[in-house]
Image: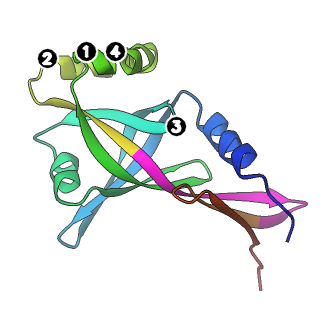
Amino acid sequence: MENINYEMEVGKIYNQIGEAKIMALATSCKNHTTVRMMSCINYKNKIIFQTGTDLLKHKQICENNNVALCVDNIQIEGVAKIIGKWTQEENKEMLKIYLKHYKKSYETYLKSDKEIIIEIIPTKITKWDYENGQPYRIFITLDNKTIKKENYILE
């Protein structure tokens, strides 16, 4: 198996995600899994979005903070953490990016006292791709900085 550069591959993935993407977010608790599209930003290689504290995704995250995201050919597993509100000083830099891409969404939630910001710290990333017409996957574990490329053999 060829040698793959961890930093380079992680960088390529975050470049593909870019500064903002609409992503599918999966959450679950008590054997109930749900998924929905979210307006997300990539801030310092963490995925950030806003939601309401009265919504199911928030309730599920409070009970089980293990979540998954999917965008294009990238699957991300991570740990969700509530980081407060946009008005907090420590969230001002993120807010600039969020406003650049999702101003209407921000303005809608701003009217609610239930608005909250959630940060997802990725722990594992799987990326599907093709090389010479052959599918393969890259598996990245961010905690211990390991990477593995595996050809996907069609039988």
Residue holding disc 1? 107
Using a 10 Å C-alpha cutoff, classify the residue at mark 1 as few (fewer than 14 neighbours), some (14 to 19) or many (20 or more): few
Q: Earlier in the sequence, mark 4 or mark 3?
A: 3
Q: Evaluate if marks 4 and 3 touch, with contact meaning CB atoms under 8 Å apart.
A: no
Tell me which numbered mark, 3 or 1, is placed earlier along the sequence: 3
Whether residue 94 is situated above or below residue 120 in the rendered picture: above
Closer to the eye: label 2 or 3: 3
Amino acid carrying mark 2 in the image: Lys
Amino acid under label 4? Lys
Q: Which residue is mark 2?
A: 111
Left or right: 36 as drawn, with respect to 10: left
Q: Secondary structure at mark 1?
A: helix
Amino acid type, mark 3: Asn
Residue 15: percent from the left, percent from the top?
66, 34
- Identity of the residue drawn at 40% across and 16% down: 93
Is disc 2 surrounded by few (<14), some (14 to 19) or many (20+) residues within 10 Å?
A: few
**Of all residues shown, which one is farthest toward the bottom?**
155
Residue 131 shown in magenta: yes
Q: Which residues are magenta?
A: 121-135
Q: Position of residue 144 (x, y in %)?
A: 56, 60
Residue at the (32%, 48%) spot, across then down: 80
Cα separation, mark 2 vs mark 3, equals: 28 Å
